[in-house]
Image (cartoon, coloured by chain):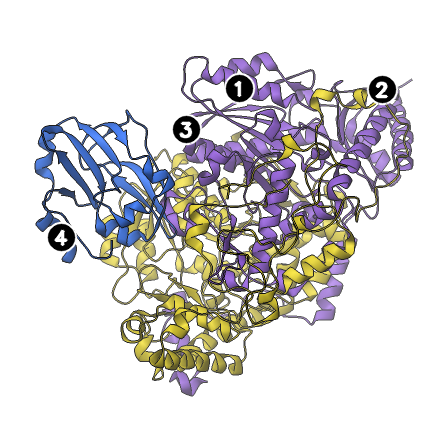
Chain colours: A blue, B yellow, C purple
Amino acid sequence: MAQASYPEDLLYHPEHDWARIEQGDAALATLGITWYAQDSLGEVVFFDPPAVGLTLTKDSPYAEVESVKAVSDVVAPLSGEIVEVNDALSQNPALINEDPYGEGWLVKVRLADPGECDALLDAASYSAALGG
Amino acid sequence: MSAIGENRLHTDPGIDSHPLPASAGAGAGAGGSGAAVGSTPLQRQAATTIFQKGAPGRRAFQCPELDVPEVDPEQLLPAHLRRQSPALLPEVSEPEIVRHYVGLSKRNFDLDSGFYPLGSCTMKHNPRLHERAAALPGHSRLHPLQDAERSQGALELMWNLQSALAEISGLPHVSLQPSAGSHGELAGVLLTRAYHEDRGQTRHKVLTPDTAHGTNPATVTMAGLEVVKVATGPHGGVDIDDLRAKADEDVACLMLTNPNTLGLFDPSIAEIAEIVHGVGATLYYDGANLNAVMGLSRPGDMGFDIVHFNLHKSFTQPHGGGGPGSGPIAVSDRIAPFLPVPVLTRSHDGSFALEEDPEGPGSKSIGRLRGFQGNYGCFVRSYAYICSLGADGLRDASETAVLNANYLLARLREQPIAEHLPLAYGELCMHEFVLSGGPMKRALGIKTLDLAKRLLDFGFHPPTVYFPLLVEEALMVEPTETETKETLDSFAQAIAAILAEAAEDPSLAAEAPYSTPVRRLDEVGAAKNPVIRETLG
Amino acid sequence: MLAAIGVGSLQEIFDRQIPEGVRLRRELDLPAGRGEQDVYEHLRELAERNVSCEQEISFLGAGMYDHYVPAIIDMLTERSEFLTPYTPYQPEISQGGLQVMFEYQTAISELTGLPVSNASTYEGPSAVAAAGYLAKLHNQRTKFVLSAGLHPHSIQTLRTYAHGYGMQVVEVPLRDGVTDPDAWAAAIDADTSAAIFAQPNFYGAVEDAAALSAAAKAAGTASGAAHAPVVICQVDPIALGVLAPPGSCGVDVAVGEGQSLGNRLDFGGPSFGMFAAREEYLRRMPGRIAGQTNDVDGRRGFVLTLQTREQHIRREKATSNICTAQALNALAGVVYLTWLGRRGLVELGELLLARTHYARECLASIDGVHKLHEQPVVREFAVRIDADVHAVRRRCLEQGVNPGVDLHALSGRPEDRGGLLVAITERRSRADIDRLAELLSAAVAAERRVAVPA
């Protein structure tokens, strides 16, 4: 994805991770990394998916994304348990670059405490923090 | 294409029926045939490995005859412990081996062939005397477990080397054991931990500047401690206020190199030492930049407790394409009890010995870091170097290294170079300096990487690129003392020429190099689908 | 030059940068420099005070061995293009070195039967410690179980590193010369990060590697742990012409001292360490790895790959801190394996098996000399002597034969008192072995008389 983009319907963590809360289920969220994160990394060559069932703790790393020049922690924006992992990434990790908010999603999580969403940033705040 | 070359062992029917390997020139890889593209002879020569050469039955080695009575193989080694099918090593003759590897050597640039200003690597001339000395059978065919009385020459050499390193560093106690700089760093952090533990303290943090060499943070983690970064101030040295804020009783050590990776001698070094020692922490010196200060300033006098040396940098152990190296350490009195074993000792009669357990049961040593006593072959070469140069020669080497760096810097600060590649920090430098390619990128549309690749066409090895991370589009240049003024001038001219080209046509550098045995390589593809061995069978 | 720089004198460059307080205002207290001829004479004189394998018939081993290094290795490792470049950070002009690494990785993979090899580590014992670190990163468990058959230097090095990165170390004793299978199984549990043994072991015995690996996996998963411990084997590469390779014995990571492969003794270094593993550990491998790729015109080429694992990119998250490795020594290693060739490695192994067996039988038939164990041996074996080992060795040395390593002096184990470790290479002929037997026989007899005065 060539142009920076921060969709309005997502919530953002300062460590460059996003969360999309499911329509119709406030305790289910899809997580991924932002445009800024994938742009900083360069072309992603490897994503080692965490296991389904793994418990995520807000603000702690739960996986790694690897590009030719760096390995970056993926930080959990919210706490919960992984219920699904994006298997397409093992064959095509570049999806994280091409479509970081769509096909490049990383995991789906059953949230432990949906109230944690309040601590996250909206698109405007997150992109403002970047621009600063 | 399989991701990892398969191990064909279990399918190999046997040594005699093994088919010929795939023919040379087929050129594996997703990109194309890999053959006959390009205008230089080396480019037209497709890369074929030794595994793609040879034929069944060819050999170089002639096994000595069986001169002992034959015994039933089952009695020698039961079948269930035996190898069932051989390793698929090549079947080639000596002429084929020589032609193959000599051919490979021609696809390498090297220091003997050209200027190699890799910052932080100290690519200075490797005197050939050292190879002759190291090849003497008394050094090269000496078994590491030979009795002390029968290896006094070797032990004296090590002792003399230790003494010289102690004098150069200003720290009296030396261990030659670590295998390379990063191994010496590990020793240093383990020594620091042991020192604190001995005083009943558990400290968790190691401070490193944000300009630190990559091995520093990795080493700290391996030694069970945590890295905390210290900021760099506006003049390129350690940010003293940030250091004061972060230096507390949970800090075990500050790891520094001086001059730092920006090539700048930190004028506040005394104050830094005071702050660090003030909280009871140790000060560790990364010797990668020692070439700037030999005979001019000593880390021990700067206040460092532990120093590591890179014999393959300042002391001319050849780099070998990536090793071997050697990373001896020197420490102050308070750290000495923790040094690794074995320890080289000298008795009252003047004879030397390696003591595995000099302190006995109360030993505070951190223990062993590797087998035997270290890379003796490197000691021979470095010792020969120190003998050749002597006190005045070593100082002269550092003075010349600094002179050359400042001269080259001065040439590169002339226009039109300076506006595109400004010096990142400072005015003068020590033995190396860091330029920023940021303005070049914005004005001319070529990055430091492109500049480096285009330099290859001019017959130079590029400087270190993208390090330290602190500097945008960094270019770290270390000419060393063994280069002539003429070489430095021609390098500056090449830089100017490349910038002038880029002003006309940035694509020239962006697609460089053109004349090297291969052109730009797909590193992303290599990381995505690693193929790290030849597929056989 | 000074004018170009803009200073009045060379000293001004230093005066302006180095504070007076840390400026060395005297000459270094070292001898003055000397010319090449003088330095050479000095180095030669030091060499002459060493008794090398050129001056005595040596049966010293215990990790490094006096093999014959063919002349082509000297010629190739002295070539400027291999001797003097740095690590290949600009791959376009380093295809020679990178391809050597790729070939080396292929050769080590073949030798060990494991698909993934790095481009070398420093040497044997620290490779064992690095493998332990890999296991720790992989499964975050807290304990290493290791066989007492590992080389003492490997055990000591592993303990030093393990103290650093925080692992408990448990040692399993030998029984009848090999790792005690019951004690091995008993020691391994769900907390075990890695189970580590040597092949052949320090006392020269061939272990049942497949059985040890299987037992480690079974014991480690018995209580329901999801994953078995990482099985690590320190292997002698010369023996892999005849011994079943680690990869076909269930081993996960094979490491080893590479000196035997085309490298000089050099009083203990430099040499190189082998490091090979199963595919799943690829991204946790320490050190450099060369990978195949193509250039923009489709030419086959090689680059350093997976560098994110290495220190200079991953920094705190690196799998190791290795920067400089042992490229030149690995070059010697792959050239040596190529020189031996497919048949040669096997023939060499068969020769060593035969001569080692012969030597052991000869020595064991001496009155007062006993085999330490009855296990198969490949190129080294241990005996126990009913006399003072130090004195016996002295008598042999005086006659120009070094009979082997004083076991107790190296291992420190009380049960190794009286032990002698004897190594056989292709340079030790039958005549040499017969001479050893003759001298040892006389020496033991003489020392037994001394110990029991008439």
Answer yes or no: is residue C162 visible.
Answer: yes
Residues at discs 2 and 4 both on one chain = no
Q: Chain of mark 4?
A: A
- Cα–Cα span, label 3 and label 4: 38 Å
* Label 1 residue SS: helix
Q: Which circle marks residue C139 in the picture?
A: 3
Answer yes or no: is residue B365 visible.
Answer: no
* Quarter of the rendering containing residue C337: top right
Residues at discs 3 and 1 both on one chain = yes
The structure residue drawn at horizontal position 40% and vertical position 58%, both measured from the top left corner, is B257
Q: Amino acid at mark 1?
A: Ala
Q: Which circle marks residue C216 in the picture?
A: 1
Residue B450 vs residue B113, the one in the foreground: B450
First along the sequence among labels 3 and 1: 3
Q: Which residue is mark 4?
A: A127
The structure residue drawn at horizontal position 64% and vertical position 70%, both measured from the top left corner, is C33
* Label 2 residue SS: loop
Q: Amino acid at mark 4?
A: Ser
- Cα–Cα span, label 2 and label 4: 84 Å
The structure residue drawn at horizontal position 53% and vertical position 30%, both measured from the top left corner, is C252
Q: Chain of mark 1?
A: C
The spot of residue C141 in percent (x, y) is: 41, 26
